[in-house]
Structure formats: structure tokens, C-alpha cells
Image (cartoon, grey):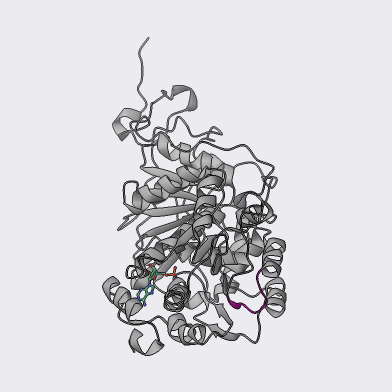
Amino acid sequence: MSFSHLGLSEKVLAAVAATGYKTPTPIQDQAIPHVLARRDVLGIAQTGTGKTAAFVLPMLTMLETGRARARMPRTLILEPTRELAAQVEESFIKYGANHPKLNVALIIGGVSFDDQDAKLMRGVDVLIATPGRLLDHNERGRLLLSGVELLVIDEADRMLDMGFIPDIERICKLVPFTRQTLFFTATMPPEIRRITEQFLSNPVRVEVSKPATTVAATTQLLARSGRDGAEKRDTLRRLIRSAEGMKNAIIFCNRKRDVATLHRSLLRHGFSVQALHGDMDQSARTAALEQFRKNEVTLLVASDVAARGLDIPDVSHIYNFDVPIHADDYVHRIGRTGRAGRNGTAITIVAGSNDAKAVAAIEKLIGQPIPYMDKIAGTPAEPQQEPRQEPRQEPRHEPRHEPRHEPRQTARPPQRGRHENQRRPREPERRPQQPPPAPVARIEDARSRRAPQPARKPMDDGDASHLPAFLLRPVTVKA
Ligand code: AMP
């Protein structure tokens, strides 16, 4: 089946052909004709299914007639994060190559109000926005939503996670009730169901492959570690160094501050790495993502909120530095690899019984067990435990690449205004009480015969694991 039977305009078909896509994905195939018929659509699909084009392509076709008026956008797309909003804008640029007069504006937090205001003034065909900044513009009287003909609510379940549902409800009441609504969510928790019942009118329901089946191309593994942060970082370094076919990797942490800590640690150990989390300012986030996309850095340490839905087509490895607290986050994280038929590897570090419980919930959700690395025939044997020095013997090794890898982003202090990534109620604020650290960070090997290692110091800054072994052998000094 080709794109030509879907009812898209010639200009749009030509742009799709130029991207090289020949066959619509199931969500495109099922949703596009209904969107063009002006039906409300409830799309249950996660990123990676081609859902962005499922609304961008028919919108481009529909917007070929009519004109935008100042401060009154014709269509509105709501996205939970700035990165997702920017990604949708890129889709309009890509598929709208033959629509040079189309005005697309991005209204996201972290960038100047004035530039956004100037764009709104010129008249906007497609407004892509995060909810908070959109409401700010509306409250200032700079934006009228009464001309919106089509509303897209994307990643609705993530909006719920981030506490945006009240904003979404307000926005839905500001746009005319006669509008067409396209609503996309990966899951249907009760709160999302309520919203769909309230704001969609007789929608066509389109559901594409369940999370567990979309990750079939990804090899999923578990690696056991001690619970201490330094031990987990040590485990992660071993995993990265022993990875097969590593092209690039995203490393997920549950908390923003752990993203920053892990990023600094990996830099100190000479890795090529960037960070992405909600407290970074917008330009730093964009720069980090661009560097990763262009393969200028190999690793990206990220929080769920920042990385959700990002389209990074060719990621070879995913590492869950922390087991995600919500099982569905696991599916989204590992959905970053194994995309478009490519193979990927996703390794989750399991540190203690709470992690094991969270893994059990994930296994239940995806309907399959995730094996430990050592139980897989043919997986690389446990990496050699790297030699260590006693803490007092450790020289302070300056990282080889530190000056070049100085992180660009500046941490922002919490602000009182509405900022998309700073209010995710479900994100834990405090670390749970941890039992004393296990003596050795290790990837599980039930047959391990290694002698117990001395307890490690809390921070791994002085870790000398990157040094050749001969430098680390004990030396007897004669008096
Ligand atoms: P999305 O689910 O919108 O994040 O899209 C995931 C990826 O699939 C993006 O890189 C798209 O460019 C790509 N894509 C979208 N539609 C198609 C298609 N019909 N054939 C192949 N790839 C596609």
C-alpha cells in the first residue's frame, strides 16, 4: 500500500516521496483518511510508530486553503516538552517543503517572549506549543484561540505525568467547541479516558501495536550492581566499555540531579558525553541534542521528561542507570533504540530489591522476562574487574578530555513561573533510604569466584580504572 490512496494533496505526496518513505505506517494508514474527513481521532500509539506524520501530513493538506489572521492561529498542537515541540516543527519543515507560505510558530518556555509575539502577530497557520507558555501568551492578551480549527494533543499521558492536565482542560475550553481534535496517547489511564470523553466528539479510535511488540528488535538485558551511586557508575562504565557494536547510547536516570552527577562523572572518566534534563536552559538542551544527533558525542545522559518522544533514529544502546519508577517509562526509554527495523540493546542496571520489584512490574507490562546478562549464552562474559588502588594510594588523575567536554549548560534555579519540566508530581524528590553499599560493583555472575574487593569510597572521582593494569600493581618499597 502506498501513500497515494490516503487522500493527501499532490504537494504533500511529493514531499513524502522526497523523504524516501514509500509505505505509510499503520497509524498513518488508519488515521490520515479520518483526519482528512474532519473526524476527531483518538490515536493510541507511542513514538516510533510514525504518529507525527499521521497528523502533520493531513494538516498540511487541509491548510492549503484559507489564510491565517494576526494573533489567531488556525491550528494548535500541544506538546509536553520543548524538544517534542521542536521535533514537530522539524516535521512541518520536512513535509512542508512544498508549502513555502505556511507559517509555523513554536511557543515554548525558555526562549524570548518578544520573538514569539512577533510571529503570532504575523498570523500563524500552525502553532506548536507547550501548555504553560501558551497560556502565558493567552493571559497577556497576545494570543486568541478562538480561530483554532484543529487541535492536536500529543503525548497526552506524558502531559498527565507532568501535571499538565488542568492546563489542557483550560486550553480545550478556550478553543471553539466546533474544532476538530486529534488526541494521541501511548496509554489510557482513567484520567486520560476522562479527558477524551470530555473533549473528543465521537472519535475514531486508532490503536497501533502494543508497547511490548514495538520493542521486538531490541535485546533487553539486566545487569546487577551494588546500590551505591559510585558502584552503579562503575557498573555502567564497565557495561559501556564492554558493549558490542556500540555506536551511541542514551543513559536514563530517574532524577535530574542524578543526570548532572552522572554526566560529570562520565566526563571525568574521559567519555564523550552530553546531558539532557529539564533544569537546563533551552539553548543548552538544543545544543546537547544536536551534538548527540550529529554523533559529535557518543553518550547522552537524560531524564525521562527531557527525552520522552525524541526522534533520534539510530541509537544502538540504551542504559537504564536507574530502573524507571513507572513501568511504562521503561517501554518509552527502550523505544529509543531498535527503531525502524534496526537492532538495539537495552541494559537495565538492577541495584537491590526495590529495583528487582520494579523490574518485575516491567516484565509484567511487557509480558516477557528480561534475562540477566550472565544467563544469556553468547553474551560477553563479565568484564574483567578493573584493578583498583586503595583510596589513599589514588593519585588525582585529571580527566584527559575535561577541558574539551566542559558541559555547556547552566543549571537554572527553580523559577516560580510555569515551566514545563519543573513540575512532574510523580518524580520523586528524595532518594529512598538506602541500605549500606554492597562491597563490590559487579555485573552478576553466579559463578563468580572473585575474591571480595575492599569497600569503595563513596565518590568515584579518583577511579583509576582507565589506567593500564601495570601502573596499578602494588609495589614493594624497601626502607
Ligand atoms: P514518530 O513516531 O512520529 O516519532 O516517527 C518515528 C520515525 O519514523 C521518524 O524518524 C519518522 O521520520 C519515521 N517515519 C515516519 N513515517 C514513516 C514511514 N511511513 N516510513 C518510514 N519511516 C517513517
Span shown in magenta: 175-183
Residue 286, position as x, y percentages in the image: 44, 48
Against 461, is 414 above or below?
A: below
The answer to whether residue 115 is seen in the rendering is yes
Image quadrant where one finds the C terminus: top left
> Residue 367 lies in what quarter of the image?
bottom right
Taking the spot 46% from the left edge, 42% from the top edge, the residue there is 284
Taking the spot 48% from the left edge, 70% from the top edge, the residue there is 67
Residue 69, position as x, y percentages in the image: 53, 65
Q: How many marks?
A: 0
Residue 323, position as x, y percentages in the image: 57, 57
Name the outermost residue toward the top: 479
Q: Is residue 79 left or right of residue 32?
A: right
The answer to whether residue 438 is seen in the rendering is no
**Residue 330 magenta-highlighted:** no
Looking at this view, is 434 or 253 the one in front?
Answer: 253
> Residue 17 lies in what quarter of the image?
bottom left
Taking the spot 54% from the left edge, 32% from the top edge, the residue there is 457
